[in-house]
Image: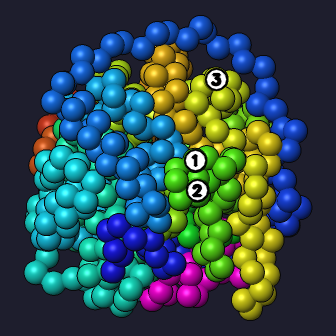
């Protein structure tokens, strides 16, 4: 169990994996000292539209008074709190206090934290955390989007088998850390916990016990109902741990696309085992890992902001000592590398990434990157308050505007450290931080006092038809209308893909149930529709395929 105010050498659970293909393994070794854009790398010429001044926030005097007292307490007693993480060092390192004093404190926003189980004691834990610093207690709500809208009576056996790595009991410490981190940065934001254990539909493979597809179902629910301004996920599993490979990974895209299309940014932690990932069958974090480099789903998605780990470089009095280094503590270090599933997104063209590379940004990961992701979700909640609405997926603006502008946009470079795996049992070279963009740290970390208003200005200047939000909406629509139909005599044959392998898919015609089809190992379904057998009238009909994550429709005619 993580202590709420003291750091621990045991990072929280996240991201297992096996190996990547041989070509990417070779690439990782070649790039282990400097990724694309690292030392001396360039993000290209910035021909973006001019920045827009962010709107104003009317400060709440009571909030400002409360948080000013919090800052005074943190300053006066900093030496006592210096080792706390999350804690005052994060407020100091990222200049959060400057925003609080202006009334930018998360008021009117909601941060969703996607978890594998709930914690009935969470309000008591956070109350104790708040009392130490004088923070206001947040509104915390827990919902259960998957299954029948509630937790099962018992923890799924596959999750129990994960032990300290991912059992339902282990999720208590993860959930508490997530809430503390997000709440610390945006103390007046509402916290929405979504508890989504595995196996609500079928008994899934080991990878889906670690990172349940039900979590993507939660993103669809949050997006559809506009329940949050930022989403954080401190979970994932290595790309090569999935039994059905790429098909199983991309079948979860609808969840990420739904959030992005709804204008909600999603942060996902990149893992704690360095350039490798934990195996899906492991029972301890980084206790049983791949022997070659790997990255993890879901942080590998181009629709996600992947959050890696650095460490605030401040002394026991709160003075900055220099740039933050990458987080690396023995066998634990932040995940970073190249995806074997997703190609390079257009926004990474400027940095010359080989495929989708992660992370995009880093924050404090002294308790694992599980801490960094909700910290950054808190930062984007502050941005949502200033923007008077969620800022949407930020990667396009991050790569094309914020990163190239560097310190003037609140980007703080991370130039030292690596995520190589030590010789236990064999050394595996990883990626090293350097000047400018690099694979190890992405763009580095942030000075929130400048980053938040600059991000809001950049988002407002780039909120056109080519924004990531609009691109996500278009991509989701294509998936939802991807059923192929062919006629042969009196029958119509359908073929559709993109479903979770081995999961059920319900076939309806004109709202009437026709059949339940099991998606094959490639995530595809097929069916012969016989109008005579189904007693379909002559004319137009609507065919619908419904699954956990994807609902696809098409129209057809009968003669």
Q: Is residue 287 magenta?
A: yes
Q: Identify the residue at image location x=40%, y=36%.
A: 97
Please tell me the numbered disc located at residue 319.
1
Main SS category, magenta section: loop
Identify which residue, 550 or 256, lies in the foreground: 256
Q: On the image, numbered disc 2 is attached to which residue?
A: 315
Circle 2 packing at 10 Å, graded few (<14), some (14-19), many (20+), is some
Can you say whether 303 is above or below 454 in the image? below
User: Do we see residue 392 in this rendering?
Assistant: no
Please tell me the numbered disc located at residue 408.
3
Cα gap from disc 2 to disc 1, whole angstroms = 5 Å
Q: Identify the residue at image location x=48%, y=30%.
A: 449
Q: Quarter of the image for the C terminus: give it.
A: top left
Kindly indicate the quadrant of the structure image that contains residue 64: top left
Identify which residue, 504 or 487, lies in the foreground: 504
Q: Kindly check if marks 2 and 1 are in contact, taking CB atoms under 8 A apart as contact.
A: yes
């Amino acid at each position: 169990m993580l202590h709420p105010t003291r750091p621990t050498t045991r990072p929280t659970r996240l991201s297992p994996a096996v190996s990547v293909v041989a070509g990417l393994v070779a690439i990782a070794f070649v790039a282990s000292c400097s990724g694309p854009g690292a030392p001396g790398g360039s993000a290209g010429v910035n021909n973006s539209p001019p920045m827009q001044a962010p709107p104003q926030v009317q400060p709440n005097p009571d909030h400002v008074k409360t948080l000013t007292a919090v800052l005074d307490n943190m300053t006066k007693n900093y030496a006592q709190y210096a080792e706390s993480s999350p804690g005052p060092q994060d407020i100091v390192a990222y200049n959060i206090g400057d925003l609080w004093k202006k009334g930018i404190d998360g008021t009117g926003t909601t941060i969703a934290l996607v978890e594998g189980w709930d914690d009935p004691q969470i309000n008591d834990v956070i109350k104790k955390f708040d009392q130490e610093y004088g923070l206001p207690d947040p509104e915390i709500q827990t919902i259960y989007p998957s299954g029948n809208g509630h937790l099962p009576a018992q923890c799924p056996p596959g999750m129990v088998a994960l032990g300290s790595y991912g059992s339902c009991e282990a999720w208590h410490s993860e959930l508490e850390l997530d809430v503390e981190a997000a709440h610390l940065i945006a103390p007046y934001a509402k916290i929405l916990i979504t508890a989504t254990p595995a196996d609500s539909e079928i008994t899934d493979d080991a990878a889906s016990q670690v990172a349940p597809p039900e979590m993507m179902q939660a993103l669809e629910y949050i997006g559809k109902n506009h329940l949050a301004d930022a989403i954080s996920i401190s979970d994932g599993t290595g790309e090569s741990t999935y039994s059905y490979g790429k098909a199983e990974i991309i079948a979860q895209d609808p969840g990420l696309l739904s959030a992005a299309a709804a204008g909600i940014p999603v942060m996902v932690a990149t893992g704690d085992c360095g350039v490798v990932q934990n195996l899906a069958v492991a029972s301890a974090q980084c206790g049983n890992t791949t022997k070659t480099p790997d990255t993890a789903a879901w942080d590998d998605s181009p629709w996600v902001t992947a959050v890696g780990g650095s460490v605030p470089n401040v002394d026991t009095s709160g003075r900055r000592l220099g740039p933050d280094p990458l987080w690396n503590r023995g066998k634990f270090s932040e995940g970073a590398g190249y995806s074997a599933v997703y190609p390079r997104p257009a926004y990474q063209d400027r940095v010359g990434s080989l495929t989708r590379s992660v992370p995009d940004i880093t924050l404090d990961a002294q308790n694992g990157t599980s801490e960094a992701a909700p910290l950054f979700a808190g930062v984007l909640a502050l941005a949502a308050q200033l923007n008077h609405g969620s800022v949407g997926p930020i990667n396009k603006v991050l790569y094309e505007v914020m990163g190239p502008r560097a310190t003037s946009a609140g980007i703080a470079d991370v130039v030292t450290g690596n995520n190589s795996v030590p010789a236990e049992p064999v050394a595996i070279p990883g990626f090293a931080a350097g000047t400018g963009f690099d694979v190890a740290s992405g763009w580095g970390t942030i000075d929130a006092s400048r980053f938040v208003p600059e991000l809001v200005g950049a988002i407002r200047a780039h909120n056109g038809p080519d924004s990531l939000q609009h691109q996500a909406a278009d991509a989701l629509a294509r998936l939802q209308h991807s059923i192929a139909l062919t006629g042969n005599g009196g029958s119509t044959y359908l073929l559709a893909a993109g479903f979770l392998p081995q999961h059920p898919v319900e076939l309806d015609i004109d709202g009437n149930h026709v059949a339940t089809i099991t998606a094959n190992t490639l995530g595809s379904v097929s069916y012969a529709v016989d109008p005579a057998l189904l007693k379909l009238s002559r004319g137009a009909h609507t065919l619908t395929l419904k699954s956990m994550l994807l609902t696809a429709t098409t129209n057809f005619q009968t003669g």
